[in-house]
């Protein structure tokens, strides 16, 4: 992780003549975007896998209608269908899981005050008037909501809210025409999944809580990564 920290600090040094005190904040945003660009092929693979599985849904529904009363036979028939069509049941999940270590690594890089046992230099910088190592609670105690540091957080909250609204509308459009039914295929929804479907569109709004409680450096990472994900998914799953 210290290697990544040094890379971000070197990028901040390059940006220093142009952005001055906010160079480290800009370096975090650019470095996060660069990492997301590197793992973009995995996102594309996940999208291809999801589309492949979606194309099989009519055949899977037919298998459920025919073998709904025999779970073992149904399971075997679905596996044979995936093998015949050369589609892995995990084709959309595995690439997404492979991305997680990089995202957790960056989150810890921008939230820990020490890196490799040494005090991290990133959190000593600022984004305008707000310290990268500070939190929203610190900004509220130093000038209030509309203080110099508080305004920085209001800007981040505005960006997160805009992304959350975009994701909310998109998720509602995607989930509305795709109700999940039981294996028998008689139109009855799977118990509990209806509630999950209602909650899913609101998940993006929980990012507001994250931005409010983590250090500003980590909040910048979260906001950049969330905005990238929204644009990326809109492009890949349109």
Image (cartoon, rainbow, N blue to C red):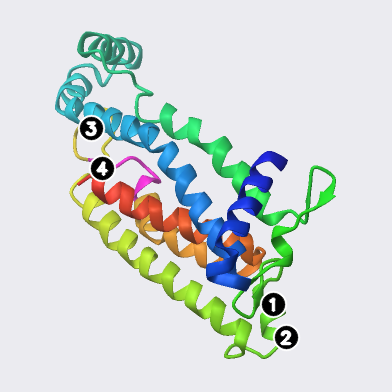
Q: Between label 3 and label 2, give the one nearer the viewer.
A: 2
- Between the residue at mark 1 and the residue at mark 4, the CA separation in whole angstroms equals 37 Å
Question: Upstream in the sequence, badge 3 or badge 4?
Answer: 3
For residue 191: magenta?
yes
Rendering coords of residue 116 (x, y %): 80, 42
CB under 8 Å between discs 3 and 2 = no
Q: Secondary structure at mark 3?
A: helix
**Residue located 62% across and 82% down the image:** 149
Give the left or right position of residue 151, taking residue 124 as reference: left
Residue on which the image places disc 2: 141
For residue 221: magenta?
no
Please tell me which residue lies in front, 137 or 178.
137
Rendering coords of residue 176 (x, y %): 22, 53
Residue on which the image places disc 3: 51
CB under 8 Å between discs 2 and 4 = no
Residue 87 position by quadrant:
top left
Question: Upstream in the sequence, badge 3 or badge 2?
Answer: 3
CB under 8 Å between discs 1 and 3 = no
Residue on which the image places disc 1: 137
Q: Secondary structure at mark 1?
A: helix
Question: Upstream in the sequence, badge 2 or badge 4?
Answer: 2
Q: Residues within 10 Å of mark 1 (few under 14, many from 20)?
A: some
Tell me if residue 104 comes above or below residue 155 in the rendering: above
Rendering coords of residue 232 (x, y %): 32, 48
CB under 8 Å between discs 1 and 4 = no
Q: Secondary structure at mark 2?
A: helix
Q: Secondary structure at mark 4?
A: helix
Q: Quadrant of the N terminus?
A: top right
Question: Upstream in the sequence, badge 1 or badge 3?
Answer: 3
């Amino acid at each position: 992780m210290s290697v990544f920290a040094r890379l971000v600090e070197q990028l901040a040094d390059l940006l220093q003549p142009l952005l001055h005190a906010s160079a480290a904040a800009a370096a975090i945003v650019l470095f996060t975007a660069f990492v997301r660009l590197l793992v973009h092929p995995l996102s594309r693979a996940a999208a291809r896998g999801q589309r492949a599985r979606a194309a099989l849904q009519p055949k899977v529904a037919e298998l459920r209608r025919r073998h709904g009363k025999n779970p073992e036979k149904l399971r075997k028939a679905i596996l044979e269908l995936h093998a015949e069509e050369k589609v892995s049941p995990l084709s959309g999940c595995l690439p997404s899981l492979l991305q997680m270590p990089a995202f957790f690594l960056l989150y810890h890089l921008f939230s820990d005050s020490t890196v490799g046992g040494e005090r991290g230099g990133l959190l000593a910088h600022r984004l305008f008037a707000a310290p990268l190592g500070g939190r929203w609670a610190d900004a509220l105690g130093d000038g209030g909501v509309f203080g110099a540091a508080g305004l920085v957080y209001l800007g981040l909250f505005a960006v997160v809210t805009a992304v959350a609204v975009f994701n909310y509308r998109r998720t509602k459009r995607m989930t509305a025409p795709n109700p999940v039914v039981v294996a028998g295929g008689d139109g009855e929804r799977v118990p509990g999944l209806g509630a999950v479907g209602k909650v899913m569109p609101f998940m993006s709004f929980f990012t507001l809580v994250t931005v409010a409680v983590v250090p500003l450096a980590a909040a910048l990472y979260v906001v950049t990564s969330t905005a990238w994900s929204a644009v990326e998914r809109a492009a890949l799953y349109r």
